[in-house]
Amino acid sequence: MVSAAEALARFLQSTESFLTLVDGISDDSWSTRPAGEEWSAAETVEHVILTDRGTLRRLRDRTGATPVDGSARFPDARIVEQMFHGVPAPPGTAEPTGRFATRAEAATALIAVREGIAESVRSGADGLRTIGFPHPVFGIFDGVQWVLFLGAHTDNHIPQLRRLRDASRLS
């Protein structure tokens, strides 16, 4: 079983990799959706931020939390595996709406939510395995699993952001 510290380290690393790619996207192409892409860089980053913010709210206020015991737990390793097997997001989940006009604005928001998650994990690590929140596809994740999910979710969007960055360099 993955510890809260290990899940947090994975999340922080994935977010750092994501931020590096954001820095490589030109301001001119920030909101441009290249042919063949579902979202622009702005929309992709906003989606990740919205997902992170939703999880941070859950971790902070524990609204909707249910007690979790080990017998009903979704396997930690499957969380990461499932993100890379084309599991579609439920419609209406963390849909981007153009909240961030610039890369700098989005990067600031991503850093802020990342720091909020890190603080929540560090301050509540002991109890994160005992509370669960529903995921719309996978069922109940405990608090540590939500942090694992966030890292895997961000990693899942890295190839997309890499393509968008590369397209911005060609334009």
Image (cartoon, rainbow, N blue to C red):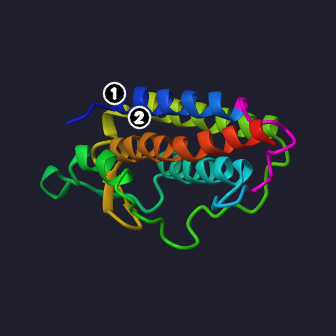
Q: Position of residue 76 (x, y in %)?
A: 25, 44
Residue at the spot x=39%, y=58% of the render?
A: 65
Q: Position of residue 60 (x, y in %)?
A: 52, 45
Return the residue nearer the eye: 23 or 111. 23
- CA gap between label 1 and label 2 equals 14 Å
Quadrant of the snapshot with the N terminus: top left
SS state under label 1: helix
- Please report the residue visible at 28 percent of the width from the left and 56 percent of the height from the top: 67
Residue at 49%, 35% in the rendered image:
120
Q: Earlier in the sequence, mark 1 or mark 2?
A: 1
User: Label for residue 47?
Assistant: none
Relative to 85, does residue 52 appear above or below in the rendering?
Answer: above
- In this figure, which residue is indicated by the disc labeled 2? 124
Determine whether, in the image, residue 69 is placed left or right of residue 21.
left
Marker disc for residue 6: 1
- Label 2, residues with CA under 10 Å away: few <14, some 14-19, many ≥20: some
Quick one: quadrant of the C terminus? top right
Q: Which residues are magenta?
A: 23-33
13 left or right, relative to 161: left
Q: Which of these two is toward me, 121 or 113?
A: 113
Number of on-image labels? 2
Does 26 appear in magenta? yes
**Rendered location of residue 105, percent (x, y):** 80, 39
